[in-house]
Amino acid sequence: MFLTLLESSRVVTQATQATADPPSVFLEDMGCQMNRLDSELVLGKLKREGFRRVPTPSEADVVLYYTCSVRERAEEKVYGHLGALKHLKREKPGMVIGVMGCMAQNLKELIFERAPHVDLVVGTSRFEDVAELLGEVRHGERVMALDRKDLGFDRDISVRPRQHTAFINAMRGCNKFCTFCIVPYTQGRERSRSVEDLIAEAKQLSDDGVVEVTLLGQRIDTYGLDLNDGTTLSKLLTRLHEEVPGLVRIGYITSHPNHMTDDLARAVADHPRISRYLHLPVQSGSDRTLKAMNRGYTVDEYRRAIDLMRNRIDDLSMATDWIVGYPGETEEDFTASVALLREMEFQGSFVFKYSPRLGTRAFDEGDPVPREEKARRNQVLLEEQRVISLRRNQVRLGTEVDVLVEGISKRDAGKYTGRTDRNLIVCFPAGRDLTGRLARVKLTDCTSLTLFGELV
Ligand code: SAH
Ligand code: SF4
Ligand code: F3S
């Protein structure tokens, strides 16, 4: 295969003949967890073709950006990176530059228009063909691959950034069409993988040393509904728990309030190795705004979805997403968001300033809330959340928790860091490497984002 690629790619052949080194690839991913996983799959494919990964574009024969379109800033950042590559490509004309993922699917040939030195635009359903597509670039032609096809989910499990934890793609796409959101357009309709496939992948990962998997889906609680055979997320979680005993932790993100079921709450409550963390984006605390957004629930229905889970799951830890400055969001609507944030006692909030996306239903409404006002609302929610997160963490001081150790802390090389089954980040000193293991830690101090402790 390695030879085939060398023969089929002018670019790679030139670079390789000169140095006799294997072809090199620089890849940066910039979106959600789903993107991170897809870019890992791309690296897996390229590794099989003989590529080695390099840490900077200047060392690379092929430069790939795995992109996000969810807000305008994400796309602008990619154009910024592409702009910086212009002179490099002039020096190294053989270099191939590719844009992959959601922004490729969203902007299509516009990317070539704005960044003419890009060679390859690959959408969200064609990343598996990356090696062949790179081969096609050899004709000196630009290649664009955007058509939808069923993904084979063929994965090289040896390519993953962390040894002990891995994402698994349970489903792709979204059918909800919230008015602000580009995801249904970039990722297509919901497609679930079979339970058997997912268990096989989890087993493979577990045999290779993975102790934690996180199932990914845009509305993970709709997992299986499109299969029309009674498959549900709760059944999948239960079977993973029973059939892959090597997994210490099984997580699932992201949930949608319309699909919380008592079955799911029960499955989590009855199986100790399923994560006690729920990511349930609410977006707004105002019924009027929720309706305008086509979210499909009222604030009261959101409360009920949460009660369903909290009633069964002890000390459930919850995070949510908010959008501030959605078109027409008044001060009163915003105040309702602040009130809901306080009431719900979330562990964490991700707050986003509304960004109009061409092609979505809200686009025609423009962007009437001024930038400064959006920034203010953003700050208010973040500050409110900081106070709650800190208080929630302080209550835990003095207790002991089991931490799944992820490795050495980036902030403090003398400490290890990991997460509890409630997705709380814990930092603690340790005399030996406990990466990938469960450590019992007594909590002694905290900030709003991190808990600190001592090994018990
Ligand atoms: N599937 C998830 C979210 C996917 S996008 C869900 O349904 O909740 C992640 C988050 O980005 C969203 O929850 C939303 O808060 C934010 N987001 C999406 N589109 C946005 C836009 N146009 N402007 C600002 N934030 C946006
Ligand atoms: Fe976007 Fe809404 Fe689908 Fe989430 S549920 S991915 S916010 S359309
Ligand atoms: Fe994810 Fe961004 Fe696409 S949030 S699904 S990478 S638009």
Image: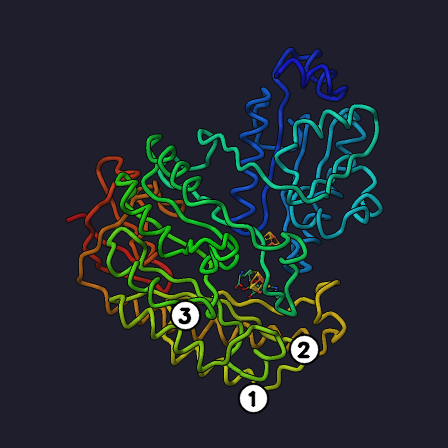
The quarter of the picture where residue 280 lies is bottom left
- Residue 225 sits above or below residue 312 on the image: above
Beta carbon at label 3 within 8 Å of ligand 1: no
On the image, numbered disc 2 is attached to which residue? 327
Beta carbon at label 2 within 8 Å of ligand 1: no
Numbered marks: total: 3
What SS does tag 1 mark?
helix
What mark, if any, has residue 408 been given in the picture? Answer: none
- Residue at position x 52%, y 70% in the image: 322
On the image, numbered disc 1 is attached to which residue? 332
Determine the CA span between mark 1 and mark 2.
Answer: 13 Å
Q: Position of residue 340 (x, y in %)?
A: 44, 80
The answer to whether the residue labelled 3 contacts the one labelled 1, judged by CB atoms less than 8 Å apart, is: no
Judge depth for marks 3 and 1 and give the one in front.
1
Mark 1 surroundings: few (<14), some (14-19) or many (≥20) residues within 10 A: few
Q: Which of 117/230 is in front?
A: 230
Q: Give the farthest residue toward the bottom.
A: 332
Residue type, mark 3 in image? Arg
On the image, numbered disc 3 is attached to which residue? 386
Q: Give the farthest residue toward the left.
A: 456
Determine the CA span between mark 3 and mark 1.
Answer: 22 Å
- Residue at position x 72%, y 74% in the image: 367
**Along the polypeptide, which appears first: circle 1 or circle 2?**
2
